Amino acid sequence: MIGDALHIEKELMRMNVSTPVARRTIREHLDGGDMTFRTKDGCTCSITPEELRFLDGICTEMEKIRIRLPILVSTDASGEGTAWRVDGSAESAAVARILGKQRRKDDTLRFFNPDLKKLRKILPNCTFIVYSL
């Protein structure tokens, strides 16, 4: 059993090798004009101006200085079915508005595959999938 747990941890680390680092806020992207972020494995990814304008239009001023891009969407195995979640009060509030969902907690939004598909269609470059236990 312990070997299996270690194997799972190792696989998750391998799957998350491209996790974003040095994430900047919406306001920093808007003010600085740099529409990119870097990942752990050294890649540079682009954020489209359209996505940034969309977020600028739906977020409060406080959210614009608190939300770091890309928004991390992680696996959530805490419930009965497979789900996804966004953590952080500002991030979860913005994603809840985009998806038309209500949060059950102030700092987390839990949602399912059809919602993930909708979110990724609206914000393909401003969201990033992270795998967790």
Image (tube, grey):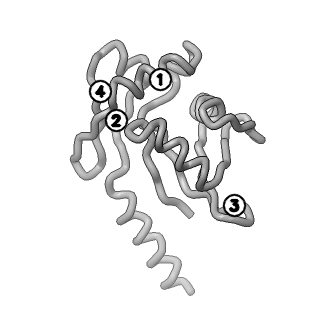
Front label number (4 vs 3): 4
Q: Of the residues under marks 1 and 4, which one precedes in the sequence?
A: 4
Q: Report the residue marked by disc 2.
A: 22
Q: Position of residue 128 (x, y in %)?
A: 43, 46
Q: CA distance from mark 4 to mark 3?
A: 34 Å
How would you rate the neighbour count of disc 2 (Cα within 10 Å): few for under 14, some for 14-19, many for 20 or more? few
Disc 3 + disc 2, Cβ < 8 Å: no
How would you rate the neighbour count of disc 3 (Cα within 10 Å): few for under 14, some for 14-19, many for 20 or more? few
Q: CA distance from mark 1 to mark 3?
A: 31 Å
Q: Amino acid at mark 2?
A: Ala
Helix, strand or loop at disc 1?
A: helix
Q: Of the residues under marks 1 and 2, which one precedes in the sequence?
A: 2
Front label number (1 vs 3): 1
Residue at the image point whose x is 71% and y is 38% from the top: 101
Q: Position of residue 129 (x, y in %)?
A: 46, 51
Q: Of the residues under marks 4 and 3, which one precedes in the sequence?
A: 4
Q: Quadrant of residue 76?
A: bottom right
Q: Of the residues under marks 4 and 2, which one precedes in the sequence?
A: 2
Q: Report the residue marked by disc 3.
A: 78
Q: CA distance from mark 1 to mark 2?
A: 22 Å
Left or right, 81 with respect to 23, comes to: right
Q: Report the residue marked by disc 1.
A: 54
Q: Report the residue marked by disc 4.
A: 35
Residue at the image point whose x is 35% and y is 65% from the top: 14
